[in-house]
């Protein structure tokens, strides 16, 4: 049966450049290349709270050992990529455009590559909360590039069950082929992972969307679905158009549901996972292996483009060296040419977000021609897959009128780059949106910090006022008490004292005390007998004394 | 003639009663202008403006007793916002109240701290934890960088550490437009 597919507005069809890196199978990087001298594993590899380090310098760790504990609910765990010694927990250069450093665990491999003990997670018999904790502790995050913690998405949503679970194998961005190769070579594991996720989210159907420029992946996945006999899982070929792999775009193509501004797809009974993440779910729950590696495409200006399974923390330049970078290489991009970020150096580590290491040169990516004024042609609005008005957002971002930019739903922009791609004036539109977004975030953070400070200040003022009043009340109470005492003493001093009566009362008290021992009342018969016997002995003794 | 005067007088009485009722019924507690000014102020509670906190300064501005350029932590941007709100002219930060510094937080050298609690009493936002004769420490997330704890410290163990940029707080820069030479 042919499924009815839907369409999203806009999008572009750039040159895909995907063939070069798909000629070779995925290679285990650590089998073909020497072990790196050190693994630099950043603790913060996902959206949300920064995991806290659980190891210190000098400790030995095993492969897969937890080295970063999740910080709060929106955070994910980090694990050691190999066995060895922790060389340091220190600030190292991050794979981030800023060129700033963050806390990393540096592991010196011992070469034994020894696993921790692994055991499958009995997810069938576990409560949903426990499964979520297991997924979080396995360090699973969205491997499509957004690195959103997956445990937050293993959730049937408000309705209690999903209508459709969408698995994203579209991989629409040029050059990147890691999901394609994984689907070709490991379709069984992905289908099993999809079945696990189907059961965890109580999904009515599972749709695995793959762009139709990957016929091998589609065929392999279809074969795996029929071989495993997995129910309610369907492979759907979708038309190739960038950005069909955006979550909202893919959901729209497969189900026709357009998730509006401010809503989540789960509100409409749909949830979306990347195929790489689904593979990670399978490994984490069925094999008990935490996420310590991923498939990385190395493409662009290299002699032998290829996909590798690379452990996190491996320096990017080691990976690139395996592919023979051409001499005119002048930049490293993490991600694809449309949405990727320029790296500050080739020395940065591979992290969970590294789906592709794109090696660039002047010839491959020539510098953009000079920016010309916006002529309001509206091409960007036609190309925008999020149905926004990019030129309006551009004007406001450029003029730093951020409130207005937000009114045009700046935060619904997925930074896909279609608008900049079609712009006849070659305006780097996405740069403006990123600038405006980070300014707005900074302002919001500042504002919430100021609000908190105000609240704390007001609370302190109120507390000081209360303490003052309490102290005053205490002093007043004490003063009143002393006054009362003084008054009583004065009254006593004023009254005439009857000395004779006092003496008589004292004598009476003394007589009462002397009258009888207090402990002879209420005695049991035995005790009385004992007392009587003792009295008799005493009398006897007295008599004997008298007769001597 | 008299009828006209009566009608006018009646109208005046009715409208006056309505206005009087409205002023009681829809009375606004507090001064909304003070709230608006207070929202712009940075809430460091540092007292550099000469008032014991941001709220008192906001009240003084609203009453016209203080100028809008007395807040160094708010800086130029703060003055511009206040000028916009109040419809006044922008003026540069008054030098006698201090200079604009990079945002920083206080840091206690825990080896020197003697646990006198004087800094805790000075902190306007309760950002310092500790007890008498116990080491104190500052919660950096709550510290507003007001510097009020520096003065009372008898052993000078508190220093101000500027907040550096981190990967999380880093901001994308304004796109630079390349200037090219024509001909």
Image (tube, coloured by chain):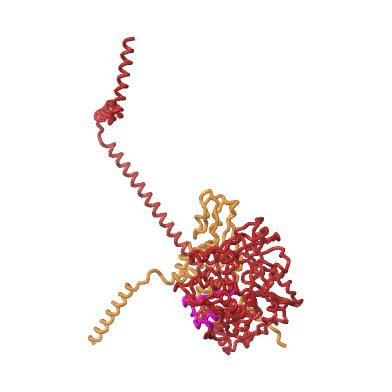
- Quarter of the image where the N terminus of chain B is located: bottom left
- The letter of the orange chain is B
Q: Residue furthest left?
A: B2
Q: Residue furthest top?
A: A548
On the image, the x and y values in percent for residue A90 come to 65, 61
On the image, the x and y values in percent for residue A119 come to 58, 62
Q: Is residue A52 shown left or right of residue A108?
A: left
Q: Residue furthest right?
A: A327
- The letter of the red chain is A
Q: Please say if B70 is above or below A207.
A: above
- The foreground one among A71 and B75 is A71
On the image, the x and y values in percent for residue A357 come to 67, 74
User: Does residue A335 appear anywhere in the picture?
Assistant: no
Residue A234 falls in image quadrant: bottom right
Residue A277 falls in image quadrant: bottom right
- The foreground one among A332 and B125 is A332
Task: Please state the total of marks drawn on the protein image.
Answer: 0
User: Does residue A3 appear anywhere in the picture?
Assistant: yes
Q: Is residue A273 magenta?
A: yes
Which region is colored magenta?
Answer: A248-276
- The foreground one among B63 and A319 is A319
On the image, the x and y values in percent for residue B38 come to 47, 69
- Quarter of the image where the C terminus of chain B is located: bottom right
Q: Is residue A262 shown left or right of residue A343?
A: left
- The foreground one among B174 and A418 is A418
Residue A11 falls in image quadrant: bottom right
Q: Is residue B73 magenta?
A: no
Q: Is residue A324 shown left or right of residue A136?
A: right
């Amino acid at each position: 049966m042919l499924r009815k597919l839907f369409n999203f507005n806009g999008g572009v069809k750039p040159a895909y450049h995907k063939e070069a890196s798909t000629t070779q199978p995925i290679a285990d990087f650590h089998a073909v290349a020497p072990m790196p001298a050190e693994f630099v594993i950043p603790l913060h590899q996902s959206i949300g709270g920064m995991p806290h380090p659980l190891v210190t310098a000098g400790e030995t760790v095993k492969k897969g050992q937890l080295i970063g504990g999740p910080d709060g609910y929106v955070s994910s765990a980090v694990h050691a990529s190999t066995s060895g010694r922790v060389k340091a927990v220190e600030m190292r250069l991050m794979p981030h455009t800023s060129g700033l450093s963050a806390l990393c665990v540096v592991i010196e491999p011992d070469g034994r590559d020894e696993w921790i003990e692994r055991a499958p997670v009995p997810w069938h018999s576990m409560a949903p909360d426990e499964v979520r904790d297991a997924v979080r502790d396995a360090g699973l995050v969205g491997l499509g590039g957004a690195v959103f913690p997956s445990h937050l998405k293993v959730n049937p949503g408000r309705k209690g069950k999903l209508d459709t679970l969408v698995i994203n194998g579209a991989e629409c961005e040029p050059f990147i082929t890691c999901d394609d190769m994984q689907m070709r070579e490991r379709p069984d594991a992905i289908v099993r992972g999809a079945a696990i996720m189907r059961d965890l989210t109580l999904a009515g159907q599972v749709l695995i969307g793959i762009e139709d420029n990957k016929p091998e992946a589609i065929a392999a996945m279809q074969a795996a679905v029929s071989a495993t006999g997995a129910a309610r899982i369907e492979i759907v070929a979708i038309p190739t158009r960038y950005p069909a792999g955006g979550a909202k775009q893919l959901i729209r193509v497969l189900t026709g549901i357009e998730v509006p501004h401010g809503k989540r797809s789960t509100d409409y009974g749909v949830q979306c996972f990347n195929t790489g993440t689904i593979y990670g779910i399978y490994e984490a729950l069925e094999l008990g292996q935490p996420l310590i590696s991923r498939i990385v495409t190395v493409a662009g200006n290299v002699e032998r483009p290829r996909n590798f399974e690379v452990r996190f923390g491996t320096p990017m330049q080691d990976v690139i060296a395996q592919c023979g970078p051409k001499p005119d290489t002048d930049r490293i991009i993490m991600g694809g040419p449309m949405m990727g970020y320029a790296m500050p150096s080739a020395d940065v580590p591979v992290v969970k977000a590294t789906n592709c290491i794109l090696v660039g040169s002047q010839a491959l990516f020539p510098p953009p021609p000079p920016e010309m004024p916006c002529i309001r042609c509206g091409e960007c609005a036609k190309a925008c897959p999020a149905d926004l008005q990019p030129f309006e957002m551009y004007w406001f971002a450029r003029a730093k009128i951020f409130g207005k930019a937000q009114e045009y739903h700046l935060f619904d922009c997925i930074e896909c780059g279609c608008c900049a791609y079609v712009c006849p004036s070659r305006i780097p539109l996405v740069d403006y949106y990123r600038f405006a977004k980070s300014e707005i975030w900074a302002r919001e953070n500042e504002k919430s910090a100021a609000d908190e400070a105000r609240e704390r200040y007001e609370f302190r003022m109120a507390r000081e006022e209360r303490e003052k009043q309490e102290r005053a009340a205490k002093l007043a109470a004490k003063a009143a008490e002393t006054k009362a005492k003084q008054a009583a003493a004065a009254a006593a001093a004023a009254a005439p004292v009857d000395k004779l009566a006092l003496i008589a009362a004292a004598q009476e008290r003394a007589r009462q005390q002397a009258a009888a021992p207090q402990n002879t009342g209420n005695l049991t018969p035995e005790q009385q007998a004992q007392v009587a016997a003792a009295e008799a002995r005493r009398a006897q003794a007295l008599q004997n004394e008298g007769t001597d | 003639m008299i009828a006209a005067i009566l009608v006018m007088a009646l109208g005046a009485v009715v409208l006056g009663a309505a206005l009087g009722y409205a002023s009681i019924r829809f009375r606004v507690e507090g001064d909304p202008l003070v709230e608006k000014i207070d929202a712009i102020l940075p809430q460091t509670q540092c007292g550099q403006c000469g008032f014991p906190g941001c709220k008192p300064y906001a009240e003084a501005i609203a009453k016209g007793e203080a100028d809008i350029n007395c807040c160094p932590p708010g800086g130029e941007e703060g003055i511009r916002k206040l000028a916009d709100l109040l419809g006044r002219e922008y003026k540069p930060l008054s030098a006698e109240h201090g200079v604009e510094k990079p945002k920083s937080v206080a840091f206690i050298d825990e080896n020197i701290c003697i646990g006198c609690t004087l800094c805790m009493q000075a902190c306007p936002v309760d950002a310092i934890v500790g007890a008498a004769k116990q080491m104190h420490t500052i919660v950096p997330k709550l510290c507003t960088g007001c510097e009020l704890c520096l003065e009372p410290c008898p052993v000078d163990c508190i220093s101000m550490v500027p907040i550096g940029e981190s990967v999380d707080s880093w901001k994308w820069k304004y796109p630079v437009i390349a200037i090219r030479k024509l001909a």
